[in-house]
Amino acid sequence: MGDGEGQVEERGWAYRRRQPEGTVLYEAVRENLATLLAEASDVGRGLPRYVERDFARYLECGVLGHGFARVRCESCKDELLVAFSCKGRGVCPSCNAKRAQVTAVHLVEQVLPRVPCRQWTLSFPHRMRWVLLKEKGLLSDVLTLFLRAVFALQRRRARRQGVRGGQTGAVSFLQFFGSASQVTPHYHALVPEGVFVPGEGACASRRCRRPRKLMWSGC
């Protein structure tokens, strides 16, 4: 066996700063944010404060000049600087991606059962959105009513298939903005595509037929 054959080279992971200030998005936000906020105020109430706050924090995210942590390797004594992140929820693609990945791993590995699931979305008419934002308790009440209706539908579908005493659950997320950062409070709910019934020492899942057509109306 010649020199080097059969040997596995050990390679470590190298940290590379993402440098957001060099991206097109960062440049667009930096150069046009003041104009956007001014125009939004001229034509209406302006953007919500949490939207303005997310934009401002995004401009500081990952930029060393706005704060960093010094990381030192105890083995090689090498040091590097890691810029602070904004941990925003609407504008920053890096923080959004990290939060989505961490949440997805947690749900898949720790929360969701190994059964098919369906995503349900609950949105509201324009005239209701500001009321719901002012009365935050209403958002929770509406979610309770919405999930109660979905769960009742699941149980009815299960009973038609001869399954009684079934129960279900949901993981729901409240989102306050749309694709254009407009005020659009809405819910995303992940619901098992069926019900759970008591089994021998555990709950067994029973899949229900998918809904053919659903129409929701509000007054």
Image: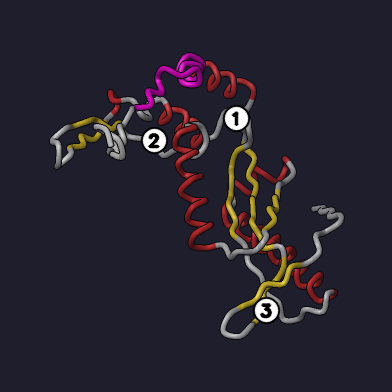
Label 3, label 2: how far apart the Cα atoms are: 44 Å
Looking at the image, is mark 1 or mark 2 nearer the viewer?
A: 2
Amino acid type at circle 1 is: Arg
Outermost residue on the front side: it is 1
Magenta range: 17-32
Q: Check contact, mark 1 vs mark 3: CB within 8 A.
A: no
Magenta highlight: main SS: helix
Amino acid type at circle 3 is: Val
* Residue denoted by label 1: 45
Q: Earlier in the sequence, mark 3 or mark 2?
A: 2
Label 1, label 2: how far apart the Cα atoms are: 25 Å
**Vertical side of 81 occupied by 177: above or below:** below
Q: Residues within 10 Å of mark 1 (few under 14, many from 20)?
A: few
* Residue denoted by label 2: 86
Q: Looking at the image, which is closer to me, 181 or 69?
A: 69
Q: Earlier in the sequence, mark 1 or mark 2?
A: 1
Q: Is residue 194 left or right of residue 62?
A: right
Amino acid type at circle 2 is: Cys
Magenta run includes residue 95: no
What is the x, y in percent for residue 23? 46, 19
Q: Secondary structure at mark 3?
A: strand
